[in-house]
Structures are given as C-alpha cells and as structure tokens.
Image (cartoon, rainbow, N blue to C red):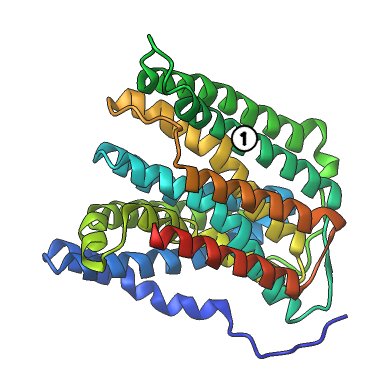
C-alpha cells in the first residue's frame, strides 16, 4: 500500500549539474586551484552517474532486473576501477585499499539504508526475492572472508622466524586473487545461465529509451567518467592535504562514495519506484563485484604495472567490512524491508564513518 509521507525531490534534477563537466575540464587545463578542480570532478561524477542510472533503468526493462543490476554495477564500478588504476600508478596503494573496503561498506550500509529509507517513505513495506538475496549474501560473505585471509596471515604470522612476511603476503594475495576471479566467472555462469530462474523478476513500468540507445548512452557516460576520474585522482592528494583528512578517511568515505555514485542514485531511484529487487541487485551485486573481481583484478594489474599491491587491510577496515556484511545479512533474512531498517543501516554507516575520521 502506498502512502506518501513527504514530497521527495526528483533525481532528474541532477541533470542540471552536467554543466560541471566542461567547467571541470576548463578548471583543470587552465590551472585553477586543485581543490576547485577536485570539487567540480565530484559534481561531474555524480551528474554523470544520474545519466548512467537512467540508461540502466531502461536496460532493466529490456533485459530484466538481474541483468540491469549487473550492468549498473559493472559500469558504476568502472569509475572506481579507473580511479584505482590511476592511483596505483601513482603509488597510492593504501588509498586504493581504503576505497575498496569503503565501497563495500558504503553499498551495504549507506546505499541499501538510503534505498530502504526512501522507499519506505512511499511504501509501508517492500518485498524482495529472498532466495536471490540469500545467495548473493553468501557470495559476498565468501568474497569478503577471502579478502581477509592475506590480512590474517600478515598479522598473525608476523613473528615466525625465517619468513619474509610482506613478500609472502603479496604472493598469497596473488594466489587468492586468481581464485576469486575464477569464482566470479563461475558466479556469472550460475546467475545468467544454469540458475537464472532464481534471479528473474518482473520490472515495473516501461522503458523510455530503446535498447541500443541506452547501451550507447552507457558507453558515452563511461568514457566521460574515465576522463573525470583521471582529473579527480590527479588532485586527490592536494585536496586531502587542503581538507585535513587522513588518507584512510579520504579513500574509505569520500572516494568510495564518489566512485560508486552511479549505484547510489540508481538503487535509491529503484526503491522509490517499489523495485527493491533491482535496488538490491545493484548494491549487493556491486559489492560482490568489488570483493571477488575488482579487488583481485587490481592486485593482478598492480603486478603488471610494477607496483605490487596486496590484500592486507587494517584491522579497522576488516572490522567495518565484516560488521556491514553481517548486519545486512541479518536485516535481509526475512525478504521484507521498511524505512526503519534503512535508518538503522544509515546510523551504523555514520558510526563507521566517524571511526575512519578519528583514525
């Protein structure tokens, strides 16, 4: 039953911010203060993400919510992947690892929380595919646990004589990364071929764009995001120093939120339209992709680039990620969500954001 509690702004208003893209280019190439170019890059990424969300929403009508969520997660993570590659090239490995854990936390707590909250403002309860949610939650828990293995080895085997622990942690990270990429490919086979019926749900409404135009728009926006991400990363160190943030907070909170803006906007919009299955497909799918594909792929790419990155994370990052996954698994166990559950997730996200800020 629908009952509007408040008048919600239309997300399409973000189209007005698209003017920030040429302004960002002008600011960057004319040598404006780094903080200005950094701020314009953030606005541009969010504006482009809103366009990406529109295209993905239409593709969900053409291909179904499962494929729509996969496309949104993939193209949405393109910005984060590009930012991470450029940061690895610059030697900002800790910033990259913080952004990876921050993305998982942001998707699990901030985006799902905002989706439940905003959807709950219009609908008393929203129901979703509990079997698909359970399978995805298990997959995410496996991915996150696998990412924790090199960290556990590094922290608990540090005093073993006769071992070069940092080098062996890199080798273990490489081994785990190869296995996780293989697992991700198997998950695609499972969800889109052998057991696609478990994830198939009906979409509401009608597409506003043709399939080909929506795909073209996705590719165009992704290209613009690549340019924007390059400029964003070039100014991130100067902006971090100017704002007085730590590298951990900048990576886990600021870069993670900006890099995943596409999923954020699309998931909230889907929830407002009572398509909570698409919202969860976007958010959980993005987190799974980060944990078992993006992070391992970055490890493999870092070796090829000559700046090896391992999967050793700080204790605070591991604690935050594990708590986020466990909380979402518990909340999504009944297949029903409401606005209060969204508020709970958002409060937990703010608590963890405070932790990263004070660290």
Left or right: 153 with respect to 94?
Answer: right
Work out whether residue 232 or residue 223 is closer to the camera in this orientation and state it: 232
Rendered location of residue 197, percent (x, y):
85, 42
Which residue occupies 51% across, 67% down?
Answer: 50
Q: Which residue is mark 1?
A: 145
Which residue occupies 51% across, 55% down?
Answer: 218
How crowded pointer 1 is (Cα within 10 Å; few <14, some 14-19, many 20+) is rated as some
- SS class, disc 1: helix
In the rendered view, tell whether residue 280 sits above or below residue 299.
below
Rendered location of residue 162, percent (x, y):
38, 9
In the rendered view, tell whether residue 150 sits above or below residue 119.
above
Which residue occupies 54% across, 67% down?
Answer: 350
Q: Is residue 210 in sight in this rendering?
A: no
Rendered location of residue 150, percent (x, y):
50, 27
Work out whether residue 178 or residue 53 is closer to the camera in this orientation and state it: 178
Total count of labels: 1
């Amino acid at each position: 039953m629908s009952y509007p509690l408040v008048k919600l702004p239309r997300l399409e208003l973000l189209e007005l911010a698209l003017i920030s893209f040429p302004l960002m280019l002008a600011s960057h190439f004319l040598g404006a203060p780094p903080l200005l170019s950094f701020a314009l890059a953030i606005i541009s990424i969010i504006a482009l993400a809103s366009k990406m969300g529109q295209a993905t929403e239409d593709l969900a009508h053409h291909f179904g919510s499962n494929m729509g969520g996969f496309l949104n997660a993939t193209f949405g993570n393109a910005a984060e992947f590009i930012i991470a590659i450029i940061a690895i090239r610059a030697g900002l490995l800790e910033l990259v690892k913080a952004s990876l854990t921050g993305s998982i936390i942001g998707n699990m707590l901030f985006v799902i929380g905002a989706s439940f909250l905003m959807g709950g403002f219009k609908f008393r309860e929203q129901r979703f595919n509990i079997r698909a949610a359970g399978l995805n939650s298990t997959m995410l828990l496996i991915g996150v646990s696998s990412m924790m293995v090199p960290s556990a080895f590094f922290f608990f085997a540090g005093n073993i004589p006769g071992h070069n622990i940092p080098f062996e942690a890199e080798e273990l990270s490489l081994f785990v990364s190869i296995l996780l990429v293989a697992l991700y490919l198997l998950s695609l086979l499972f969800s889109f071929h052998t057991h696609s019926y478990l994830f198939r749900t009906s979409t509401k409404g009608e597409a506003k764009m043709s399939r080909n135009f929506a795909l073209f728009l996705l590719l165009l926006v992704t290209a613009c995001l690549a340019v924007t991400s390059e400029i964003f990363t070039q100014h991130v160190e100067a902006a971090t120093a100017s704002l007085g943030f730590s590298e951990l907070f900048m990576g886990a909170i600021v870069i993670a939120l900006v890099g995943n803006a596409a999923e954020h906007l699309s998931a909230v919009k889907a929830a407002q339209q009572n398509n909570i299955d698409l919202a969860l497909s976007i958010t959980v799918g993005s987190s799974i992709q980060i944990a078992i594909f993006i992070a391992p792929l970055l490890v493999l790419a870092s070796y090829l680039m000559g700046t090896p990155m391992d999967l050793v994370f700080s204790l605070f990052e591991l604690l935050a990620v594990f708590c986020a996954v466990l909380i979402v698994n518990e909340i999504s166990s009944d297949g029903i969500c409401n606005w209060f559950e969204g508020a709970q997730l958002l409060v937990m996200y703010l608590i963890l954001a405070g932790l990263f800020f004070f660290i």
